[in-house]
Amino acid sequence: MKVIAMRDGSPLVTIQVVFGTGSAQDPAGQGGVAWMATAMLASGGSRTLTYKQILDALFPIGARRSFGGVLPDVQRDDPRSWLAAG
Amino acid sequence: MGQHDVFAYEYEQHDFANGLRLITVPAPYPEVVSLYIVVQAGSRNEVEEGRSGFAHFFEHMMFRGTPEYPPERYEAVMQETGASSNAYTDDDRTVYHSTMTKEDFERVLAVEADRFQNLAYPLEGFQTEALAVLGEYNKDSAEPVNKLFEVLRDTAFDTHTYKHTTMGFLRDIERMPQMYEYSRTFFDRFYRPEYTTLVVAGDVRADEVLAQVERHWGGWVRGSYECMVPVEPPPGGAREAHIEWPTYTLPYVMVAQRAPAFSDESSEGAALDLIGFLGFSESSPIYERLVIEEQSVDLLWASNADHVDPYLFTVMARVKEKERVGAVREAVLETLCGFAEAPVDGQLLANVKSHLRYRFALGLNNSEAIASTLAHYVSLRRTPETTNKLYRLYEAVTPADLQAVAAKYFGEAGRCVITLWEGGR
Amino acid sequence: MFSGMILDPGWRQDDFERLRDDAVNYLEVALRGQNDEELAKDVLCSRVYAGHPYERHNAGTASSLHALTVARVKEFYLAQFAQENLTIALGGGFPAGFESRVRRDFAVLPLKGRNQGELPAAPEVRANELYLVEKAARGVAISLGFPIGVTRGHADFPALLLAASALGQHRMSSGRLFTRMRQLRGLNYGDYAYIEHFPGGMYTLEPLPNVARRRQMFQLWVRPVDREYAHFALRLALHELERFVRDGLTPEEFARTRSFLSKYVNLLLKTKLAELGYAVDSDFYGTAPYPEYVRAGLRELSLEDVNAAIRRHLRWEGLKIVMVGEGMTEMRESILANRESPMTYNSPKPDEILAEDEVVMRRVIQVAPENAVVVGVEQVFA
């Protein structure tokens, strides 16, 4: 795990999570599996919350969630910004 | 963030003697300056028959040179500055924008001033550019949503210029090469200081910007044209149209209701904005039902797009099966009418207000974003203050206001429904 | 909640079905149905990397998506989403202790993932190939290119970045292709050149971070051209490419473009998200922070360096050429027979242009019939 921390005085917090894997790793006959894995994380529910519950929780704070997409070598999950607590 | 002023930056607003307005926002982002030149003329101003699409075409012509800066020289200067620049046109505005490092700001300001005052292009350049516009229409034509809007406007409006899209009717685009004389008239009418506002945001001092703008833009001569845009008569009943799309697509349904003009005084528009989110955002009940549970729809949005004159509140859904289009259309209409029938939950309304406030503030995270956001509002009311007024209106909207505005605007009389699916090959 | 989404996914069947529909519709509706230009680019990528892992579309194919199951997706996640290939970038005003909390949270992932193996080099492209996608459309979208051995960090990267900018900086009106094809001839809406993968070009005015790749290609993007002039436009693009590679940049073009890029790179890190994205990319390629990396590289360049790099890495033969539009069987015949493709204008043109057109309309494009394929759009990523 590598963490790149670029802290400043802004009231926002931005996080980007990138996995060094992608569609180039799709096993034979499973084209799109990397894409679907990322989609399930970014636009699906977690074990404890349904997708609807996640959408409802993020909505009032205007948090932006974007499914950065899948490339052959990297998958960018969920870059997002929100206002820090307070 | 203050409860009341959603636009949190200090700014200076200055009117020059010729009618030009300058808005300067010194922003805490170092080295970079963003310049947005907002002309309050867009496809709304295409009032004469056969001239649809002209404002957009004219935006292209602004890159066709002046005596001092022919196109090659203009490009060379802009390239040397490293500016990222482009332009866009829509219904109510034409916007020319550049973002650059601060040491090049005055140079860019000067070449921009030159083309706004001294544009002069030959017939040949004009006719060649008309082809590039047709190329733009061609590239956009693969997208059904563009066609949906084209037909929606044509169906919903009778006399107002919102009847046509910014791109214009194809028949008019094809005739553009013959409109050279008219292009000079268009420039003479609208490319005038009283139609124009400069928005400057970034690593600048307001007094310095003021002096620079005076130097390069102060001699620009005021015009006299007043554009009389035809008033659309009140809606006379529901309208419908259907589009057969020649290539593979999922079906679409678009439901539009006539809606009031943008206002920072009356809360009707603000209430409709809120309904757009309450009714159709990712957090709405209909989204949960159609997209997440039934999974009969894969795209859903609503928009009460700000316009100078009364426009449309639009809902669009992309439906996975043609057989479901009718049911989706009914669900959209039920949702709209539901806002008139019962008051919404106060907490849900508070969530939407919160969402809008955060989204606005989060979006203003760099100089270009500040200038581009202001460019939108400046073309409606010519001052950043309008954003603060609008967000105060949002705060004040009550569930009863939503009910009243839904009852007033979501009736059958002002409705227009457009469907599109594959067929007719 | 955020870490829950990534570290403890729900793997619900209904989420899976909704997202699989989205993926299939992305391929069948958004791409094949509605975006001829992105389709041409994605097909080009697939053709350039034929036989290579990059050949596959990132979203797979409609049929491979239909064959997937939640279990397969979960299996991929468990095998690939490991600490060893994880990079987390944090920006803004996060509280003290936040970084260690994030580290702790993500430590639940397995340390190592499945061995990814070596990514092969791109296959060599020797002969021209024509891949024509038949689809009802008002214009013809054209993309063409070939693999290059240069990625960020390579000694020639700054020189090629400058070269591509001079030939066709994305969405700017300054490039040679834009000037010669659109500005002077009105052929289409724009024409650009790239030395790096550049997805979603129609939605962004500037290059975006987070699209890093271990292998890169050179490509030209010719925006939709009237069918009648598509053969001419292809010839003109190749004519310009040949002239560019043979003669290189002029001293004046070199100076202007270097000035442009040295400043332009400072504008790219506009938002915190972009800043993080570029930091992650620089880490991926092992370079200094992007703006410094580019500026330092440009500072040391001479015109001769750039022109030599162009000759080393670029070419005008041995191309994969993709066209999407109507009438592709006829287009194939026209190109194979090297039929003349005269250009006509709606206004008088300077003699220089007319003389050049005389040459361009007869330009020979060598394609063997077996390397010229027409496919129906419904067969693409099917």
Image: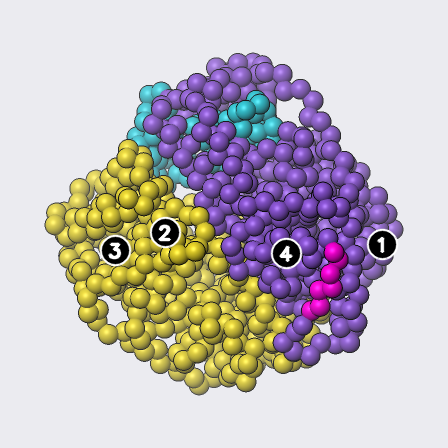
Q: Look at 34% across and 27% down and name the residue there.
A: C14
> What chain does mark 2 sit on?
B
Q: Look at 84% across and 43% down and name the residue there.
A: C312
Can you identify the residue that label 2 sits on? B421
Of labels 3 and 2, the one closer to you: 2
* Shade representing chain C: purple
- Chain drawn cyan in the picture: A
> At which x and y percent is residue B30?
58, 50
Can you identify the residue that label 4 sits on? C330
> At which x and y percent is residue C91?
52, 35
Main SS category, magenta section: loop
Of labels 1 and 3, the one closer to you: 1
Can you identify the residue that label 1 sits on? C246
Disc assigned to residue C158: none
C315 over C364 or under it: above or below:
above
Disc assigned to residue B272: 3
B342 over C174 or under it: above or below:
above
Give, as a three-letter code, the residue at label 1. Arg
